[in-house]
Amino acid sequence: MKAIAVAGGKGGTGKTFVAVNLARLLSSRDKTLLVDADVENPSTLFALPAEVKEVKQVESFKPLIDEAKCSKCGLCVKNCPEHALVMLVDKRILYFEDLCSGCEVCKLVCPSSAVNRGLRVEGLFKYGSYGESLDVVVGELKPGIRRSGFMITRLIEEHRGLFEKYSYVVVDSPPGSGVGLLSVVKEADVVVAVSEPTPLGLNDLKKFLTLLERVEKRLKVILVVNKHGLPGGLERDLEEEASKRGLPVIAIPYSELVVKSYVERRPIVDLHPESQVSKGLVEVAKLVSS
Ligand code: SF4
Ligand code: SF4
């Protein structure tokens, strides 16, 4: 199994577009799984008409304190690693759901068995497929929940066994340069960094390449310059950043066909296989699988 993380710094660089088309191309060679780990804003299913076959609710632990059993010893408060429990002067215990990681330490340390198991819904996992050899798993955080790190970790941990059944696992990574992205990149063999020739794209690429230095294992990194050829674009600056680190660069030209493929909800490599955009994507697939 080869794991490929497609990452793109800020949103809107074309990360999902590259991930979907790359997965489609790799699936023509061998069994491929596309994982949408952009849990706050998953959009692979808008770019690929995959048939969703199963939806599973993702739940986590939340403490429910039984006041009748609670001796007010404060051990749960003292041991909570996230400071999600606070004891007031009148000994009432307050619970801050946004801080809670669901670790269950409070339940384990309670000497009075006063902490019961409550459940909270974090989001959904959706399972689908497109054609014979491309399957899709989407992690979708419930709106208003600020726990994308939890969902991404759960998405990876719960599907590790599934990943092993595929020759290629393409992960549409979360945007930004935070912990969620780091946990995806740590699992990867190849990283496809998608950037665009704008000042923001250049700034995000620099941040992302700095983040990669924190990953201890050796990674194959490929820079994809999307929307190449924009008037006044900073292609040369992006290429300089890549050459400083010896990274291969592949250009995907700016094209209205990309917008059309989104409107038609079909991979451009299927719709317009002879386009320059598709040819660039084929180059990415070749480099990834070599
Ligand atoms: S589950 Fe963990 S984080 Fe949540 S309140 Fe209990 S000890 Fe704290
Ligand atoms: S550890 Fe148990 S008994 Fe002690 S304060 Fe917490 S809930 Fe109450």
Image (cartoon, rainbow, N blue to C red):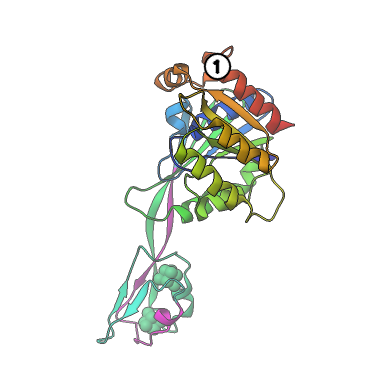
> Residue placed at 34% from the left, 64% from the top?
97
Magenta-span inclusion, residue 175: no
Q: Residues within 10 Å of mark 1 (few under 14, many from 20)?
A: few
Q: In the rendered image of this protein, does residue 265 appear above or below residue 148? A: above
Q: How far across and how far down the image is residue 164, in percent?
A: 67, 42
Q: Is residue 61 above or below residue 19?
A: below
Query: Is residue 289 or residue 7 the one in the foreground?
Result: 7
Quadrant occupied by the C terminus: top right
Q: How many marks?
A: 1
Asked if 107 appears above or below 124 in the picture, the reply is below
User: Residue sitting at 51 percent across and 22 percent down?
Assistant: 267
Residue picked out by circle 1: 270
Relative depth, front residue between 158 and 7: 7
Amino acid, disc 1: Asp
- The image quadrant of residue 43 is top left
Q: Which region is colored magenta?
A: 56-79
On the image, the x and y values in percent for residue 289 come to: 71, 31
Which of the 4 image quadrants contains residue 166? top right
Picture quarter with the N terminus: top right
**Looking at the image, in which quadrant does ligand 1 appear?**
bottom left
Near-viewer residue (157 or 36): 36
Quadrant hosting residue 117? bottom left
Residue 38 can be seen, yes or no: yes
- Note whether residue 37 is visible: no
The picture places residue 233, in percent across and down from the top left corner, at 49, 29
Residue at the location (36% across, 62% down)?
98
Relative image position of residue 79 (x, y in whole percent): 46, 79
Which SS class for mark 1?
A: helix
- Report the side of 217 relative to 59 (left or right): right
User: In the picture shown, does residue 6 fall above or below 185?
Assistant: above
In the shown orientation, is residue 119 left or right of residue 35? left
